[in-house]
Image (cartoon, rainbow, N blue to C red):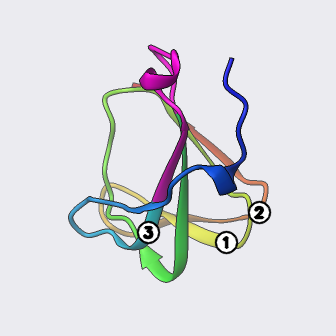
Amino acid sequence: MKVTTLDQVPSVPMQMEGAINVTKQVPLAKVDGAPVYSFRVFTVKPGGQTPYHVHDFEHMNYIMAGSGVLVNEGGGPDSGQSRGFCHGAAK
């Protein structure tokens, strides 16, 4: 079992075309003995964004602080979210 805090996990710039002012931390991943599940924390600074994209795996987004907007397939705003909002996406 791994026990850590976010201040112990390196924060690196997100490497995705179209991502602006976003950093990523990975407190739990395959290297920690979790072969199926990973836990990733993204910090989006004011004015930051990630482009519309999809994954070939199930995932969840949870807003810990601040607010943001999900974008739909057409590039338009789907809905606004704020602290406590949870969004899950199936394969």
Q: Where is residue 35 in the image (x, y as percent from the top left)?
A: 45, 14
- Looking at the image, is mark 1 or mark 3 earlier in the sequence? 3
Q: Residue at x 43, y 22 (%)?
A: 30
Gap in angstroms between the C-alphas marked 2 and 3: 17 Å
| SS at mark 1 in the image | strand
Q: Kindly state the secondary structure of the residue where label 2 is placed.
A: loop
Please state which amino acid type lies under the numbered disc 1: Ser
Residue 25 appears anywhere in the view: yes
Residue topped by disc 2 = 83
Q: Earlier in the sequence, mark 2 or mark 1?
A: 1
Q: Which residue lies furthest to the bottom in this view?
A: 47
Give the residue displayed 52% in from the left and 23% down from the top.
32
Q: Residue 15's quadrant in the figure?
A: bottom left
Q: Is residue 90 magenta?
A: no
Question: Which comes before the other along the chain, label 2 or label 3?
Answer: 3
* Furthest residue in direction front, as rendered: 8
- Report the Cα–Cα distance between label 1 and label 3: 14 Å
Quick check: marks 1 and 3 in contact, CB under 8 Å?
no
Residue 87 screen position, x and y as percent = 61, 44
Residue at 26%, 59% in the rendered image: 16
Task: Say the numbered circle drawn on residue 67.
Answer: 1
Q: Which amino acid type is shown beneath numbered disc 2?
A: Arg
**Left or right of 14: which side holds 39?**
right
Q: Where is residue 47 in the image (x, y as percent from the top left)?
A: 48, 85
Give the class, few, some or many, for how many residues have Cα within 10 Å of label 3's Cα (few <14, many ≥20): many
Q: How many labels does the image show?
A: 3
Residue type of the residue flagged with mark 3: Val
Of residue 18 and residue 22, the one placed in the foreground of this image is 22
Position of residue 33 relative to residue 88, above or below, is above
Q: Mark 3 highlights which residue?
A: 22
